Image: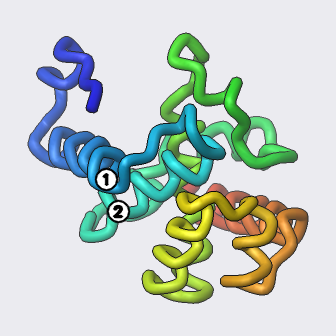
Amino acid sequence: MLLNPGIFESLDDRGAQIVLTHELTHAMTGVTAAALTPWVVEGFADYVALASDRRPVRSSAAQVLAKVRDRGAPARLPTVADFASTRHGLGATYESAWLVFRLLGERAGDRDVVRFYELVRRGDPVEQALRNVFGLEQGELVTLWRSSLERLARSGIR
């Protein structure tokens, strides 16, 4: 588990709880983004961390939704390079990965989200796990996710 003390100390109680739960999810599942597809690892950790959060999505995903309003939805799921710690807009990348899992959870429920994550964690290719658990090809998931991002971005206009 890795926490940046300067950033962590600046968080309010909600933010600190989300970060701790996110990092503990990594620790408890024994997974790091280096070992698996980063959007799966980071998106699942945020899915767990935000499961009981009461804030509206437009607040919890404000950075990525602002980007979508300005530039449109990303053409692809986040890559390893998108999660580089020196990358500008890293918060939006984490939010976008979380929104993939939020979408999957809305479509199929928590049990299937956990089943998907476990299959990937055990070594199944992401594409195979998506098909087996959700009946989706990765391209279909991207299309659904992009539509969801655009809908959320439109509904969150201030």
Image spot of residue 45 (x, y percent): 40, 53
Q: Residue at x 37, y 48 (%)?
A: 30
Q: In the displayed structure, does residue 149 sit left or right of residue 35?
A: right
Image spot of residue 118 (x, y percent): 51, 68
Relative depth, front residue between 62 and 104: 104
The correct choice, above or below, for 103 with respect to 13 in the image is below
Image spot of residue 147 (x, y percent): 78, 66
Q: Which residue was labeled with disc 1?
A: 25
Q: Residue at x 67, y 83 (%)?
A: 133
Task: Please say if the residues under marks 1 and 2 sit with CB atoms less than 8 Å apart.
Answer: yes
The answer to whether one can see residue 31 in this image is yes
Image spot of residue 9 (x, y percent): 12, 22
N-term-proximal mark, 1 vs 2? 1
Residue type, numbered disc 2:
Val
Q: CA distance from mark 1 to mark 2?
A: 7 Å
Q: Which residue was labeled with disc 2?
A: 48
